[in-house]
Image (tube, rainbow, N blue to C red):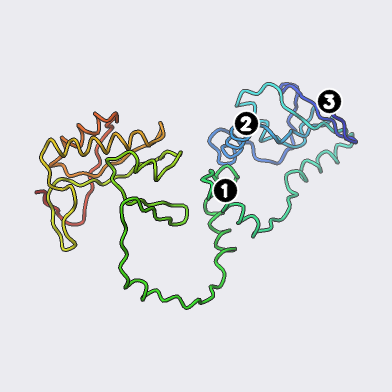
């Protein structure tokens, strides 16, 4: 037990604590936005914010955390125990703990959010919602831009040629020029990470030719096309998290090969979505 001035750190049974009847904070229940925020924080970081309790067991601060902790199965909680005999002071402290907060240094906060975002950290765990973060970034980062006389039109006239193995960095995103039937393509792109979502649009094997030219691997025999899809799907399956999802665009003329290669590669086919287009597109 650690004692600092009038505060004592103690571990108390939840059953021994008495929530204040006058507590003005909204009572939370499962499914409430604030409830889920607190729960996510406790699950991710552990219980690091103690309950403030008076000497008689009355909870002064932390009612919402206490509700979530109880629902999570905690039997005992770490508390900071104080001794305040004046009930009016207890009530005033209850309000102050819920109301008094410090102001943010918005530039430092925005930089911190960027660091977490670049590290692929789930920003929901900070308690900030996406619109709040967007508003913060807009306020801090969207400053007046200084002209550097970069010739955009001139650069766009220059040919851009990508070769196999090239990786393009677009902010935190990475795009690779590679062969999806080879596992090393995924290893080079992802490193030690795995994908949480796959959205893929392979060739449909319909031998289409447009003004930009023909699509590679779009005119194969039935057996070769199945093997082509199977090799790709096997590599994709090995590069995904266990709980990841995959969506595959395809033409129904090759539906049998797509579905067979998909299932043979280890995937579970849960359904097929139909894309209702604005104009009729006939199969070949």
The answer to which quarter of the image holds residue 91 is top right
CA gap, disc 1 to disc 2? 26 Å
* Nearer mark to the viewer, of 1 and 2: 1
Neighbourhood count class around disc 2 (C-alpha, 10 Å): few under 14, some 14–19, many 20 upward: some
Q: Nearer the viewer, residue 143 or 40?
A: 143
Neighbourhood count class around disc 1 (C-alpha, 10 Å): few under 14, some 14–19, many 20 upward: some
Q: Which residue is mark 3?
A: 1
Label located before the other in sequence (2 or 3):
3
Q: Is residue 207 left or right of residue 147?
A: left
Which disc, if any, is residue 68? 2
Q: Nearer the viewer, residue 198 or 218?
A: 218
Q: Residue at x 77, y 24 (%)?
A: 11
Q: Are marks 3 and 1 in contact (CB under 8 Å)?
A: no
Label located before the other in sequence (3 or 1):
3
Q: Residue at x 34, y 71 (%)?
A: 156
Q: Which residue is mark 1?
A: 116
Residue 55 sits above or below residue 117 on the image: above
- Percent x, y for residue 44? 59, 35
Q: Residue at x 31, y 73 (%)?
A: 157
Q: Secondary structure at mark 1?
A: helix
Q: Is residue 33 left or right of residue 232?
A: right
The answer to which quarter of the image holds residue 240 is top left
Which quarter shows the N terminus? Answer: top right
Q: Secondary structure at mark 3?
A: loop
CA gap, disc 2 to disc 3? 25 Å
């Amino acid at each position: 037990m650690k004692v600092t001035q009038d505060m004592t750190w103690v571990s108390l049974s939840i059953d021994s604590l008495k929530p204040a009847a006058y507590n003005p904070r909204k009572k939370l229940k499962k499914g409430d936005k604030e409830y889920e925020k607190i729960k996510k924080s406790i699950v991710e970081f552990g219980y690091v914010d103690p309950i403030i309790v008076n000497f008689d067991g009355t909870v002064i601060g932390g009612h919402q955390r206490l509700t979530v902790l109880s629902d999570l199965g905690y039997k005992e909680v770490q508390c900071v125990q104080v001794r305040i005999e004046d009930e009016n002071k207890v009530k005033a402290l209850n309000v102050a703990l819920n109301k008094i907060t410090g102001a943010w240094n918005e530039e430092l906060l925005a930089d911190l959010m960027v660091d977490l975002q670049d590290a692929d950290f789930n920003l929901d765990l900070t308690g900030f919602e996406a619109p709040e973060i967007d508003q913060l970034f807009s306020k801090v980062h969207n400053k007046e831009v200084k002209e550097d006389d970069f010739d955009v039109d001139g650069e766009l006239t220059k040919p851009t040629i990508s070769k196999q193995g090239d990786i393009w960095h677009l902010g935190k995103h990475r795009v690779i020029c590679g062969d999806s039937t080879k596992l090393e393509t995924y290893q080079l792109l992802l490193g030690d990470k795995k994908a949480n979502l796959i959205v893929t649009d392979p060739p449909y094997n319909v031998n289409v030719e447009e003004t930009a030219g023909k699509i590679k691997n779009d005119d194969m025999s039935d057996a070769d096309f199945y093997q082509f899809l199977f090799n790709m799907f096997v590599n994709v399956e090995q590069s995904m998290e266990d709980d990841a999802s995959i969506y595959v665009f395809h033409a129904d003329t090759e539906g049998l090969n797509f579905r067979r290669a998909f299932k043979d590669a280890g995937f579970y086919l849960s359904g097929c979505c139909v894309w209702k287009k604005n104009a009729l597109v006939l199969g070949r």
